Image (cartoon, rainbow, N blue to C red):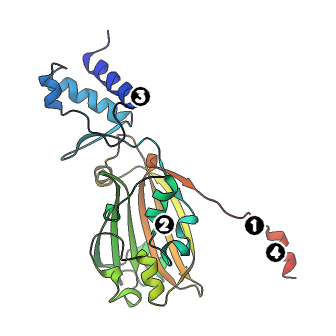
Amino acid sequence: MAPKWRELADRFAEQIRNGEYAPGAQLPQIRDLVKAGEGSKDTVHKAYKELEAQGLVTSSRGHGTVVRQQQPLKRLGIGRYDKAKWRDSDEVAFIADRVASGRAYRRNEQTQTVSRVKASPAVAAAHGLPEGADVYARARVVKEGTQPTHTLTSYYRPEHVEGTRIVDPTPGPAGRGGGFRVLYDAGYEIDHMTEELFARVPTTEEAQLLQLAPGEWVVELHRTTYTADGTVVEFAIGVHAATRFAWSYDFKVPDSAKTEGENE
C-alpha cells in the first residue's frame, strides 16, 4: 500500500492534469487539509513537495502552493525585436513573447531597479571599457501572474543613457516602446545583435527568486546590441527558468558561397 502522502500527491496530480486545478490556481492550505482529515502536517507537506518535484506546482512564502503554467512561453528569437513592435507601437520584447504565445500580460509584470555600478569583466569586455568602469545596470524581474519567468539586467554606458527614461527606476518598461525606443530617441537606433545561450544549474538565490522546482536548470542569455556603425549600446544578461520557455527562431538560411561569388 502506498504511503498516505503518495496517495494525496497522486490525487492532486490527477486533478491538475485533468484541469480541475488550472494553471495559476492555488492548492488548499496545508492547515486546511489537515483539518479536513487528509493527514498530518508532515503528510501534506510531503505530498506538496512531491508535486513540486514533478514540476506541477511552485511553493513560496506569501503565495502558497500554486499550479504551474504547463505550456511554456514561446520566446521569440528574432521577431521579438522587430522595430515595428517597439518603435511604432508599445510591444516590448517580453510582451511580444506573450502575444505570440496567446497569453495575457500586464506591463507591471516587469519590475526593475536601476543603479550605477562598476563593470564586471564580461560587461567591460562587451562595451570595450576598462574593468571597473561606471555603467548603468537596469535589472528586471519578469513574472507571468505571480510566477517569475526570468530576470534580465541590461548594462549601458552612462553617456548613452544619462538623463533618459532608462535610468528612471519606475517599475515596468522604460516608457512606451521600452529601452530600445529610448535609445532610438537618443540617436542610437539598434541595428543588429548577438545572443549566446548557456544552460546551467541555478544558484540558490536564483532558485528562490524564480521559484524553481528542485533539479530545474536555467538558461543564461548574453545579448549584445549594436548600432549600424558597430557601437555597443546594450549588453544584457538574462536568467530564464528552463522549463518555462520554448525558444523559437525563424530566419533566412544564408548561402555564403553565393555571397562570395557576388562579391568577386
Q: Which mark is residue 259?
A: 4
Q: Is residue 30 left or right of residue 53?
A: left
Label 4 and label 3: CA atoms lie apart by 53 Å
Q: Nearer the viewer, mark 2 or mark 1?
A: 1
Which comes before the other along the chain, label 2 or label 4? 2
User: Which SS class for mark 3?
Assistant: loop
Which comes before the other along the chain, label 3 or label 2? 3
Image coordinates for residue 8, horizontal then vertical, percent: 28, 21
Q: Nearer the viewer, mark 3 or mark 2?
A: 3
Image coordinates for residue 16, horizontal then vertical, percent: 37, 31
What kind of residue is marked 2? His
User: Which SS class for mark 1?
Assistant: loop
Is disc 4 in contact with disc 3, using a CB cutoff of under 8 Å?
no
Vertical comparison of 160 with 3: above or below: below
Nearest to the observer: residue 78 or residue 240 = 78
What kind of residue is marked 1? Pro
Nearest to the observer: residue 20 or residue 141 = 20
Of the 4 image quadrants, the one containing the C terminus is bottom right
What kind of residue is marked 3? Asn
Give the residue number, with chain letter if any, for mark 2. Answer: 222
